[in-house]
Image (spheres, helix red, strand yellow):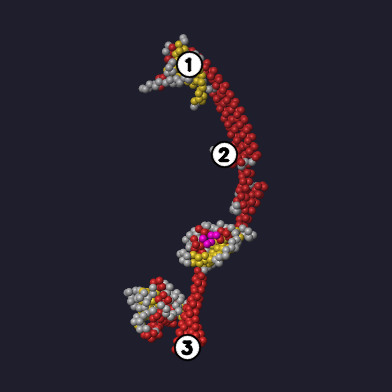
């Protein structure tokens, strides 16, 4: 009901005041006229009912006085004949029924007892009014409605010589002329009422179509234009001032649509340029709105934070950042998003009211360090925040290089300090106390200074070699027979090995194909590996250089895929905890067991040379048993470009 009231209220509110007054006046006039007409019809019908009642009472008394003696004599045949003539003589009588004292019907027109009897006798009773009294000799009248119209029922007691015989019930039809007149009056009144309202409704529809509807269309069009829908048009075939207004509105909408399309095309082109530029830059770029929700993310940022398979546009940034980075950026991001200035003294944290620069670290899944620059995007008046731009740079390599550089400088300084201090000490001693020293002591001091000078020279040379290998210098690679650098290495260390009673063994497979490599670099690899093996191998030990071809296809044994080189010793071995760090700069295993001469750069140089040859140096070692270093070299092919960086 409330919903219906709301609908009617909205419908009524759309009409103008003039229309509402016309509708109200029409309703009042039509209701008054209809009320007067129905009152007149009702009065006529009531008068007709009174006349029907009088007519029925008189007719019933007349009929009862004529048939009572016949009923008393039980002459039902004559009663039926007389009643039939009486029924057929007038159209005002609907029915005539005779009932005994108990109300059982023994004769009736237009039906009789004989017509309603069959094999199962059906006994009908006359339904008398509740207040009917047989002792009262006056007729009783009532009206009831049937599908064929209203009928006046008259109940007349049947009495003969003061003996009650039963009841006569006679039905009187209404006056057909009065009924027809009343119905005609009612129908005319209803027709007039409907006609008046039909005219009012047609007038309202005409008014709505000619004036109200165009105004509503214009109002709707203006609202759509205000909402940015410039495709709105009004198509109503109207003339005059209203038609000109509609035509002007359509022209305005068309111009606005054209202007919007031009602007959208320009903005789309600029956006495409910006997105292309952002997607191609090497740094990560992230654009946020003022609520820290993601608007744009370039592929570099997706890769940095592992967002490639995630739908993150429109989502809250801090929900997707790695927890370590999110914790470090949560406070500064919120400060910038609400345009609050903030300053910290930490070296990795700097923020102003419009921008901030941070260095954050990520440990999982891999160690990474990022430099993140956060900048506010303000409107042209520099008053309202429109968004936030984050630029992310992966400075992991830079940090590692800086740390390696610092460590390298520290290690070199430490390694240089020791021989320089020893040389200076012995020379100062000779200079100040030379006259007090014996010749033997002087020679010993000079030999020590010379030994430290050699150590210093080796250190400088190794540093230079390592620096040269790590630079962008190019090396010319060519076909190389491994017999030559192996043989030269063994000749170099032959006397030293003989002094230490260590056997040098050459085990090279015959007819090995030439490899792709650089002679001097591979010679330095063999020299460093054999030199290390000699330092850590005890007397009566052995050092073997083994070179052989690796065949991947057993069905073609003559086809060698690559050549493997192994340098095996029977020395003290390398503990498992030291094997991962053995190739680091200045790492020396002898520091863990005993002190021997060395710079700690030999294996680092070997690793860099292996990288130049696109291979990797591996080792297998067991403490007290020995160590084997091995690496693979590519077989030389004519089409291979003989250059390495």
Dot 3 crowding, Cα within 10 Å, few <14, some 14–19, many 20+: few
Asked if marks 1 and 2 touch (Cβ < 8 Å), the reply is no
Sequence-first tag of 1 and 3? 1
Q: Position of residue 172 (x, y in %)?
A: 51, 20
Q: Give the residue at x 59% y 58%.
A: 338
Q: Position of residue 637 (x, y in %)?
A: 41, 78
Distance (Cα) linking label 2 and label 3: 126 Å
Q: Quadrant of residue 176?
A: top right
- Taking the magenta stretch, the answer to whether it contains residue 70 is no
Q: Is residue 585 left or right of residue 246?
A: left
Q: Give the residue at x 58% y 23%.
A: 44
Question: Quick one: 473 or 620, which is closer to the camera?
Answer: 620
Viewer-nearest of discs 2 and 3: 3
Quarter holding the N terminus is top right
In this rendering, the answer to whether 388 lies above or below 116 is: below
Q: Which residues are magenta?
A: 327-331
Dot 1 crowding, Cα within 10 Å, few <14, some 14–19, many 20+: few
In this rendering, the answer to whether 639 lies above or below 373 is: below
Write down the residue under mark 2: 5
Q: Is residue 285 visible?
A: yes
Distance (Cα) linking label 1 and label 2: 55 Å
Distance (Cα) linking label 1 and label 3: 173 Å
Dot 2 crowding, Cα within 10 Å, few <14, some 14–19, many 20+: few
Viewer-nearest of discs 1 and 2: 2
Sequence-first tag of 2 and 3? 2
Viewer-nearest of discs 1 and 3: 3
Asked if marks 2 and 3 touch (Cβ < 8 Å), the reply is no
Q: Position of residue 612 (x, y in %)?
A: 45, 77
Write down the residue under mark 1: 133
In this rendering, the answer to whether 262 lies above or below 177 is: below
Res 437 label: 3
């Amino acid at each position: 009901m409330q919903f219906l009231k709301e609908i009617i209220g909205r419908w009524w509110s759309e009409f103008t005041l003039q229309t509402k007054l016309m509708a109200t006046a029409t309703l009042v006039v039509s209701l008054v006229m209809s009320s007067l007409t129905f009152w007149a019809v009702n009065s006529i019908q009531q008068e007709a009912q009174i006349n029907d009642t009088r007519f029925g009472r008189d007719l019933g008394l007349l009929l009862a006085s004529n048939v009572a003696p016949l009923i008393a004599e039980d002459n039902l045949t004559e009663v039926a004949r007389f009643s039939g003539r009486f029924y057929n003589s007038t159209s005002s009588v609907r029915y005539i029924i005779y009932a005994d004292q108990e109300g059982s019907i023994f004769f009736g027109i237009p039906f009789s007892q004989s017509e309603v009897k069959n094999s199962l006798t059906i006994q009908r009773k006359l339904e008398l009014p509740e207040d009917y009294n047989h002792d009262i000799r006056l007729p009783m009248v009532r009206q009831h409605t049937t599908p064929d119209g209203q009928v006046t029922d008259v109940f007349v007691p049947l009495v003969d010589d003061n003996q009650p015989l039963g009841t006569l019930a006679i039905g009187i039809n209404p006056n057909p002329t009065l009924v027809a007149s009343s119905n005609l009056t009612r129908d005319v009144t209803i027709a007039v009422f409907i006609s008046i309202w039909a005219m009012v409704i047609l007038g309202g529809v005409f008014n709505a179509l000619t004036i109200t509807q165009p105004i509503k269309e214009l109002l709707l069009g203006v609202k759509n234009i205000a909402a940015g829908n410039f495709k709105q048009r009004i198509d109503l075939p109207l003339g005059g001032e209203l038609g000109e207004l509609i035509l002007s509105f359509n022209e305005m909408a068309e111009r606005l649509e054209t202007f919007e399309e031009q602007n959208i095309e320009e903005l789309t082109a600029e956006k495409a340029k910006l997105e292309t530029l952002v997607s191609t830059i090497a740094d990560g770029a992230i654009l946020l709105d003022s609520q820290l929700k993601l608007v744009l993310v370039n592929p570099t940022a997706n890769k940095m934070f592992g967002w490639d398979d995630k739908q993150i546009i429109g989502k809250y940034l801090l929900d997707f950042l790695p927890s370590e980075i999110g914790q470090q950026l949560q406070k500064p991001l919120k400060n910038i998003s609400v345009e609050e200035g903030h300053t910290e003294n930490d070296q990795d944290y700097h923020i102003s009211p419009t921008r901030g620069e941070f260095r954050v670290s990520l440990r999982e899944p891999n160690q990474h360090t990022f430099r993140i620059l956060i900048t506010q995007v303000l409107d042209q008046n520099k008053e309202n925040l429109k968004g936030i731009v984050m630029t992310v740079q992966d400075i992991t390599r830079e940090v590692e290089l800086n740390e390696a550089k610092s460590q390298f400088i520290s290690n070199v300084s430490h390694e240089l300090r020791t021989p320089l201090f020893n040389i200076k000490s012995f020379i100062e001693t000779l200079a100040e106390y030379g006259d007090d020293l014996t010749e033997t002591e002087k020679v010993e001091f000079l030999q020590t200074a010379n030994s430290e000078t050699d150590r210093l020279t080796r250190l400088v040379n190794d540093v230079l070699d390592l620096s040269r290998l790590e630079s962008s210098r190019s090396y010319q690679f060519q076909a190389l027979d491994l017999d030559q650098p192996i043989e030269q290495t063994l000749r170099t260390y032959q006397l030293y090995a003989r002094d230490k009673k260590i056997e040098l063994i050459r085990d090279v497979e015959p007819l090995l194909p030439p490899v792709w490599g650089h002679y001097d670099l591979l010679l330095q690899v063999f020299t460093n590996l054999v030199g290390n093996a000699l330092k850590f191998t005890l007397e009566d030990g052995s050092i073997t250089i083994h070179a052989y071809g690796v065949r991947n296809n057993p069905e073609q044994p003559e086809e060698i895929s690559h050549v493997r080189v192994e340098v095996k010793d029977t020395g003290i071995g390398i503990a498992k905890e030291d094997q991962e760090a053995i190739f680091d700069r200045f790492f020396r295993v002898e520091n863990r067991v005993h002190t021997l001469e060395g710079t700690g750069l030999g294996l680092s140089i070997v690793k860099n040379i292996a990288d130049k040859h696109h291979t990797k140096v591996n080792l297998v070692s067991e403490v007290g048993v020995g160590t084997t270093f091995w690496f693979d070299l590519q077989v030389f092919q004519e089409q291979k470009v003989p250059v390495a960086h």
